Amino acid sequence: MKMMWKTLKQAIGKQKDKSNFPNTFLINDQRITDKQEIAESFIDYFPNIGKASSQNVPTSSKHFKLFKKPSLQQVIFRADRIRL
């Protein structure tokens, strides 16, 4: 089982090699190298990303259901109305 996961990770390019991981991050216009500070910045950033992103989405007068594709259940119920 362990060998299978190793093979899958190699196939998708997910290696344990961390050499491509950046040594520094630019946070609030400051270059940060301390791993603890980087981790804390990620902890601060990610819980707020949804709220911050949603503020950039324009409001719409259209009902949200207009953007939603019909579910499989809705399609099946409509299919029984088809007459040939």
Image: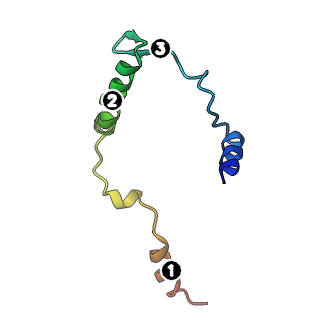
Residue 45 image label: 2
Task: Say which quadrant the C terminus sits in.
Answer: bottom right
Mark 2, secondary structure of its residue:
helix
**Within 10 Å of the Cα at label 2, are there few (<14), some (14-19), or many (20+) other Cα atoms?**
few
User: Quick one: label 2 or label 3, which is nearer the N terminus?
Assistant: 3
- Residue type at mark 3 is Thr
Q: Nearer the viewer, mark 3 or mark 1?
A: 3
Residue 76 image label: 1
Q: Residue 13: percent from the left, percent from the top?
A: 67, 37
Q: Nearer the viewer, residue 84 or 77?
A: 77
**Within 10 Å of the Cα at label 3, are there few (<14), some (14-19), or many (20+) other Cα atoms?**
few
| Image color mode | rainbow
What is the residue that sits farthest to the bottom in this orientation? Answer: 84
Cα separation, mark 2 vs mark 3, equals 16 Å
In this rendering, does residue 56 appear at all? no
Mark 1, secondary structure of its residue:
helix
**Within 10 Å of the Cα at label 1, are there few (<14), some (14-19), or many (20+) other Cα atoms?**
few
Q: Is residue 68 left or right of residue 22?
A: left
Cα separation, mark 1 vs mark 2, equals 43 Å
Q: Is residue 78 depicted above or below 35 in this figure?
A: below
- Residue type at mark 2 is Tyr
Q: Residue at x 61, y 32 (%)?
A: 16
In this rendering, does residue 23 appear at all? yes
What is the residue that sits farthest to the front in this orientation? Answer: 2
Q: Residue 75: percent from the left, percent from the top?
A: 49, 76
What is the residue that sits farthest to the top in this orientation? Answer: 30
Q: Residue 63: percent from the left, percent from the top?
A: 30, 57
Q: Residue 74: percent from the left, percent from the top?
A: 45, 75
Residue 63 image label: none
